[in-house]
Amino acid sequence: MTRTREFDVNETLDKAMHLFWEKGFVETSVRDLVKHTGVAHAGLYSAFGDKESLFKAAVKKYCLKIADEMFGVLDRNNAGRAEIEYVFELILQMNKDGRLRHGCMLVNTAIEFSETDDELKRIVLGNFNKLKKALSRALTHAVAAGEVRNDLPVKRIAIAMATTIHGLAALSRAGMSFSTIEEAILAALEQLD
Amino acid sequence: MTRTREFDVNETLDKAMHLFWEKGFVETSVRDLVKHTGVAHAGLYSAFGDKESLFKAAVKKYCLKIADEMFGVLDRNNAGRAEIEYVFELILQMNKDGRLRHGCMLVNTAIEFSETDDELKRIVLGNFNKLKKALSRALTHAVAAGEVRNDLPVKRIAIAMATTIHGLAALSRAGMSFSTIEEAILAALEQLD
DNA sequence: GCTATAAAAGATCAATTGATCTTAAATGGA
DNA sequence: TCCATTTAAGATCAATTGATCTTTTATAGC
């Protein structure tokens, strides 16, 4: 009884996410979004509400798609040292192939928004804590399995690693050299021995 | 033979710097600057040029005033472990008393600008490298003086510490808890033993 | 085929932006 | 005292913003 939508909502959200990831919220105009997604102004508004709602949907999609892709491996039942090393290896690889060229959308959002939007602040802090806990679990397993030094202060190292990862996100966006990124990652892993 | 300026240029730049530090470039309007500095629109333009020039002057002032205040101690002739510990202690203190509430202006600028403005990108990367080199020098002295483990990989740990400091800047702005900041700092210092 | 409905397209709105222009006030040497 | 010059104040400009409104097009049940 009604005209069918011609664009794919999920695909459009994905394109919007990448544009917001690159340019942030205020520097991305609705016209930019129209051009980049190929969806008309009214189409975006009917599907996602206003620009702010679209941005928040994009951030949530980033958490599910990108952050989970990067750190989901830590949630495996008996994730240990190998999974932690895999995460840092992946960060290195993503730096090399350009996937972290724009940094981390959550860190970018923290800088742009955490002082003015409580929901976004909660999302950013929540994801840091999620990463911290996942690292803690994996480190605990690693200690039990004798894969790391046995006096390792698990919670402290988990926080240090999560902090390093967030620092690397900022440095990646800033265009830091690959070799510097690599050194920071090697130092993070050497804390385990 | 001419009317004297009624406002102090340095003081005005300082006020503008703090507003830009808090809100970033695009979210700070010229009207905000007029209100916050108490200097009329034309006064700002005659003294600093356009908004972009004022922002860059503010970033350079931040480097000289804030960054030097935080890390200048590392440039002392024989800075060693004590000076490194002082820097991290200062970061902790500045988190506690709110001076890092808005994060680090250089990290904020990196996120907002390093993809679109080469001069600002150079300034941000240059300051990272300056910090890295200062830490390297101090670590080298610390190794020579036997203040840290003697197999310490100086360059790598310097990069790791600088990365941690940049991560802490992002987390501070994001409103991370004081205890988490403290744990990250303790982990950074424990790498020395 | 007809009609009610919703999507697509893009014109248009008021508000805000950075920047400029106009006017009035203040200064200090002649 | 007077005038050339610079500053201060703020009105104003064109451009851009997010959002809405209007018109056209496509759809699916009858």
Image (cartoon, coloured by chain):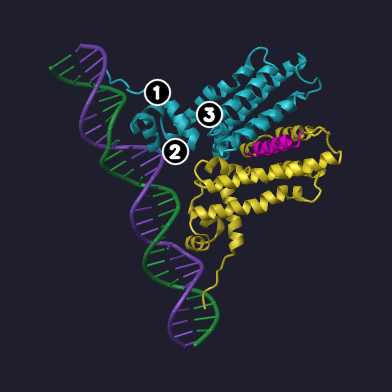
Chain colours: A cyan, B yellow, C green, D purple
Q: Choose the circle earlier in sequence order: 1 or 2.
A: 1
Question: In the figure, B31 relative to A35: above or below?
Answer: below
Q: Residue at x 36, y 34 (%)?
A: A35
Chain letter of the residue beneath label 3 in the structure image: A
- Is mark 1 in CB contact (under 8 Å) with mark 3? no
In primary-sequence order, the first of circles 3 and 2 is 2
Q: Residue at x 82, y 41 (%)?
A: B142
Residue B157 magenta-highlighted = yes
Q: CA distance from mark 1 to mark 2?
A: 19 Å
**Residue A82 appearing in the image:** yes
Secondary-structure class at tag 2: loop
Total labels drawn: 3
**Amino acid of disc 3:** Arg
Magenta span contains residue A9: no
Which residues make up the magenta segment?
Answer: B153-169
Q: The residue marked by circle 1 belongs to what chain? A: A
Mark 3 near mark 2, Cβ–Cβ under 8 Å?
A: no
Residue where numbered disc 1 is placed: A9
Q: Mark 2 — residue?
A: A28
Which mark is nearer the camera, 3 or 2?
Answer: 3
